[in-house]
Image (cartoon, helix red, strand yellow):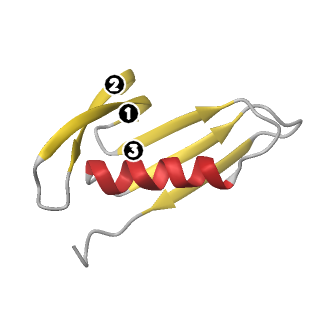
Amino acid sequence: MVRQQFPIHVYDLDGTRVGHFVADLLVEDSLIVELKACPALLHEHWAQALGYLRASRFEHAMLINFGPSRLEVKKLILSTAGR
C-alpha cells in the first residue's frame, strides 16, 4: 500500500514522541519516499531524508528527483542495530 502525504511520528532520543512530519509517500509502512524536482540532489536533501529516518525510527528511505534530464533515484538505509 502506498500512502500520500502521510504524517509520521517523530521521536526524541529518549523515545518521547515530539511531533510529526509529513512524508511525500510511505510505501508498505516501511519505506519513506521523498520526491524532489530540482536540478540536482543536494546535501540538504540527503540530510533531510536521514533526519527523517533517525527521528521516525524507520530504516529505509528513497530520494527521487524528477528535475534533471535523467531521473535520479537514491536509496538510504539507516540500520537500527546499534540503537
Q: CA distance from mark 1 to mark 3?
A: 6 Å
The residue at 48%/38% (across/down) is 33
* Whole-percent x, y for residue 26 in the image: 38, 33
Please give the label number shown on residue 54.
none
Would you place residue 14 above or below residue 65 in this image? below
Please say whether residue 58 is visible from this viewpoint. no
In the figure, is residue 61 to the left or right of 53? Answer: right
Query: Nearer the viewer's eye, disc 2 or disc 3?
Result: 2
Residue furthest toward the right? 69
Q: Quadrant of residue 66?
A: top right
**Mark 1 falls on what kind of element?**
strand
Q: Split into 4 quadrants, where in the image is the C terminus? A: bottom left
Q: Which residue is mark 1?
A: 26
Q: Which residue is mark 3?
A: 31
In primary-sequence order, the first of circles 1 and 3 is: 1
The residue at 25%/79% (across/down) is 82
